[in-house]
Amino acid sequence: MELYELTAHELLDQIKNNATTPRDIQQSLKEQIERVDQKVHAYVRLFADGLNAIPDPQNACPIPIAIKDNMCVSGQETTCASTILAGFVPPYDATVIQRIKTQGCPLIGHVNMDEFAFGSSTETSCYGPTSNPWNLECVPGGSSGGSAAVVASSESVWAIGSDTGGSIRQPAALCGIVGMKPTYGRVSRYGLIAFASSLDQIGPLTKDVRDSALLLNIIAGPDPMDSTCIDRPVPDYTQSLVNDVRGLKIGIPKEYFIEGMQPDVKARVLDAIKLLKKQGAEFVDITLPHTEYAVATYYIIGTAEASSNLARYDGVQYGLRKQPDHLRKSTLVDMYEETRSRGFGKEAKRRVMLGAYSLSAGYYDAYYLKGLKVRTLIKQDFDKAFDIVDAIITPTSPTTAFKIGEKIDDPLAMYLSDIYTISANLAGIPAISIPCGFGNDGLPVGLQIMTKPFDEEMMFRVAYAYEQNTEWHKQRVQL
């Protein structure tokens, strides 16, 4: 295998054994990006010092990493793949970026995403779509599609993404890699450009489960800059990587195995369940009765918070500023309207309008407040389930990757791409997607594992036990 194809822990072992150097790894990745990214279109900007700086041999983890374009990197343009933030250069690092830099990981660059993380396909970006490395005519998923694509195409060893309703897990599933959303509050959101503040969470996209645990070790932990970040100790997640699920009770929710799922996706997930049964896990049929309301609840709460968060982009202090061309004399309101009309894409405008509607006088109680109440019921469903099971297993996505352009003009069909991932964000629980095979079309299928809040160790244990008895995570794309 080439250096760029290896996992972070394999590369760290090679460095330790003097079989390679950090500089060799950087050069290998640089050549792979030059060879492949013209096909995948995953990077929106490469940092000048990302793969060119001479690494310090004393660094704890000198493994290069890609960053989603909604995390502030000091001195680097950060745009959320939106025209309205063109030219915005943060004067500070997001907390996760600080922690990554402290470990000595070179930042390769920012990768593509759906504009402001609004999407499930990485097609709403102002930079144009990213392709799925397994089939360049298909989407990589979203909104962290660039993060998933660079890992799947070996243009980065690992990457950081954000997950509001499945934006790490769904693209991980569609690209055949591991994507993990931590418990809400486990990782600081300081410096993450917000979509929906009560749902967003930053997490790792990696080639295998061990790398996911390693990267979570780096980015997790309390942060005084984020009042929603929980002040509790962070365990060493690599200690939970045990190839043993004997005696564990795993729940199978009937609401997740319904019509509309691609038959071969269902077959691969059922195969995974059979394998875990052979390993000694006990499976229990459970019910999460409010699942049918999850998509509607998510798109009320998510759009309301997005509308509020995006109100700050008005052309006054940073980013795009446009004056109307047709007016000789324009007012401040004219500037606001022109800037927001030209700066936001179609999907961003749709979510701003939906959110503003549900927050408006006369509709707040009927929509947003009711959405919050149903969210509580969804969380209570999971609380009851975790009283009797250690983990819950579901598909990650109802389908394999769809064609670029196939759903872009059908918002409802696009929103349903996240039907299996949304509930974890509403409940605030950790969830991971791991590869569990391929569909009849040759595209990857993902298996989702969810556990109770702050029990990432159990989630990693089940994921690792499955992974160690399969070869799916070792598959590499050849482009």
Image (cartoon, helix red, strand yellow):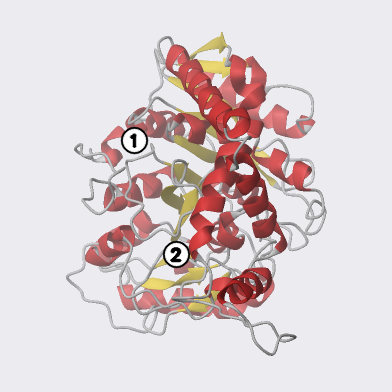
421 over 60 or under it: above or below: above
473 over 26 or under it: above or below: above
Looking at the image, residue 290 sits to the left or right of residue 438; the answer is left
Question: Mark 1: which amino acid?
Answer: Leu
Residue that appears at 34% across and 29% down: 455
Q: Residue 131 shows which numbered tag?
A: none
Which x, y percent locates residue 271? 64, 26
User: Label 1: which residue?
Assistant: 241
- Of residue 337 and residue 36, the one placed in the foreground of this image is 337
Can you see residue 472? Answer: no
**Quadrant where the C terminus is found in the figure:** bottom right
Of the two numbered discs 1 and 2 in the rendering, the one whose residue sits closer to the viewer: 2
Looking at the image, residue 365 sits to the left or right of residue 25; the answer is right
User: Label 2: which residue?
Assistant: 67
Callout count:
2
User: Quick one: label 2, few (<14), some, or many (20+) residues within 10 Å?
Assistant: many
Residue that appears at 79% across and 55% down: 403
1 over 382 or under it: above or below: below
Which x, y percent locates residue 356? 61, 48
Label 2 sits on a secondary structure element that is strand
Question: Mark 2: which amino acid?
Answer: Ile
Can you see residue 174? Answer: yes
User: Quick one: label 1, few (<14), some, or many (20+) residues within 10 Å?
Assistant: many
Which x, y percent locates residue 376? 48, 23
Res 238 quadrant in image: top left
Residue that appears at 47% across and 67% down: 4
Residue that appears at 41% across and 31% down: 459
